[in-house]
Image: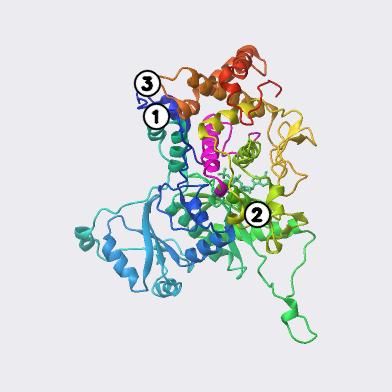
Amino acid sequence: MAARGVGLLSRLSMCTQRSQVLRPIHRRLSCPGTVAADARGEQPSSGSSETGSEDRTPKKRFSEVQKERREQAQRTILILCPNKISEKKFLKYLSQHGPINNHFFFESFGLYAVVEFCQKESVASLQNLTRTPSMGTEAAIPFRSRFFNLKLKNSSNETSEQSCIPCCNQSPPSSKKLFELLCDAESIDDQLNTLLKEFQLTEENTKLRYLTCSLIEDIAAAYFPDCAVRPFGSSVNSFGKLGCDLDMFLDLDEIGKFNAHKTSGNFLMEFQVKNVPSERIATQKILSVIGECLDNFGPGCVGVQKILNARCPLVRFSHQASGFQCDLTTNNRIALKSSELLYIYGALDSRVRALVFSIRCWARAHSLTSSIPGAWITNFSLTMMVIFFLQRRSPPILPTLDYLKTLADAEDKCIIEGHNCTFICDLNRIKPSKNTETLELLLKEFFEYFGNFAFNKNSINIRQGREQNKPEPSPLHIQNPFETSLNISKNVSQSQLQKFVDLARESAWILHQEDKDHPSPSSNQPWGLAALLLPSIAKSVSHDKKKRKKPASERIKNLLESIKSSPENSTNTNGKRTVSTQA
Ligand code: GTP
Ligand code: MG
């Protein structure tokens, strides 16, 4: 999981000064990043800033991006290199197999190179000249993969010509660096965009994710030659942070699929197959055998765990070279469709990703989310909450899922396991929002909105974009957008929800206080988003709670009442909700 290190902010000295405290006048429309650039149909340069919702560049469909990236990954190889290497000679050596489109190096327990050839044939040519290593006391299991080990025949020659190899960073910024960047920002809007730029997946990290899936696909193809291993979740939905896990889906649907009408004559041929009592058992058997295969023969796959009794059976492992924690599932097509939906929401307006990233970082900094499964809110649920909140603005920043369904045409129709997952796939046909609220306002309003949401009786529903009565008594109810009878946050306990509510109220209050008495640039105080990421808020909330043993603090309640009644807020209420303490 990403955002590691944000929690260390409290240990940092508060010496970074706020260079300027400027209130944002214009809405910033910076939308940097790889997946956002994918959506805009361009080759991104990491960290560039371009316009978002006002951008008229045709945007690519999710399926187009997936197809292109997959094809690109199939022409790409991963090489463990000696530390002392001449980049020029290295590229010359590989070029004998064909032209190279691009390459980059990164460090992860060694120096690795990712090299993308222009043609797939180059990979086969290289494989033909590659040998299986002869081991000393151990024995090697021969496996012809696209993950290589480069050795120097004579290291002394190479050392004299080596140059410093530039390595791409695959990790999020340190908490110190983030803190400095946030404190140096010009406005809260600037802070949110800075955080997005620093945490979002880079072009190289995205390539490495698709390459890792492609390498796993090669292994799975030993059993299922026509399978595909597709990334889903935050690696592709535009909400992934550097360091997030890699969710993969073993897609067996294309195997043996063809149009029966195209075969001539009165005969129809079917494969002889083994039958098992249920789809779930089939999934478990397939994942079990792939798990064994990864464990025994998968180069760089370590710590393989088969978690087959989970609601969604999976194989979890670490891909050592890329450093990714991988979750491999199968028969999980709805999750892929959810990723597409989030990708669309992320691409519709540049404020969406900036807000989601900040809320995710805020939640992680206060241990509201965790990489370990438990009774806490997940990043997926948080993203749904932000989407829902943006649907509730006036005018709405995001359309409802039902509206996206009305825009769908025949080719968008999608029914998975009886669930209607239809929505428009062409982003370019969705009108941008007329809402011009700043990120600063949205951040504040998000905390106020959920600090006062009637979680005890209402459910969050992005399909209809309005609150609904909870159909079951779980503390937090967020309707699964496609399997509408399911609650995606069923795991969340009352105490975790209360912690979320307390922190949201406290954060709303902090932002409101800053509005009133702007911290002076020389006050050495973290401000805006930086102040919200400090774990000290969490401590004060839990400390107060211990003392009072009451779910909601009178102090916060009074403060929120004062926010509600302040004249400043009454003139600033674009869809603003009144403050109460009903949660
Ligand atoms: P990260 O925390 O950055 O990994 O976010 P993520 O969106 O990738 O979440 P996660 O790895 O937990 O799950 C991967 C994907 O599985 C999500 O994006 C969803 O599409 C799907 N998913 C996760 N949790 C649920 C759930 O409770 N219900 C359903 N229906 N799908 C889920
Ligand atoms: Mg994930």
Q: Is residue 168 left or right of residue 478?
A: left
| Three-letter code, disc 2 | Lys
Name of the residue lying farthest toward the bottom: 265
Label 1 neighbourhood size at 10 Å, few (<14), some (14-19), many (20+)? many
For marks 1 and 3, give the CA distance. 9 Å
Identify the residue at horizontal 58%, vertical 42% (top origin).
434
Q: Is residue 352 left or right of residue 196?
A: right
Model colouring: rainbow
Look at the picture and state if 35 lies above or below 11: below
Q: Which mark is residue 183?
A: 1
* Residue 568 can be seen in this image: yes
Query: What range of the chain is rendered magenta?
Result: 347-376
Q: Are marks 2 and 1 in contact (CB under 8 Å)?
A: no
* Left or right: residue 197 compared with residue 247: left
Percent position (x, y) of residue 524? 37, 21
Relative height, residue 24 to residue 310 (above, below): above
Identify the residue at image location x=45%, y=52%: 205
Residue 504 image offset from top left, x and y in percent = 59, 26
Residue at the image position 59 percent from the left and 44 percent from the top: 433
Measuring from the top left, give residue 14's x and y in whole percent: 38, 23
Give the quarter of the image for residue 470.
top right
Disc 3 designates what residue?
A: 524
Give amino acid for label 3.
Asn
* Magenta span contains residue 491: no
Identify the mark nearer the N-term, 3 or 2: 2
Residue that label 2 marks: 337
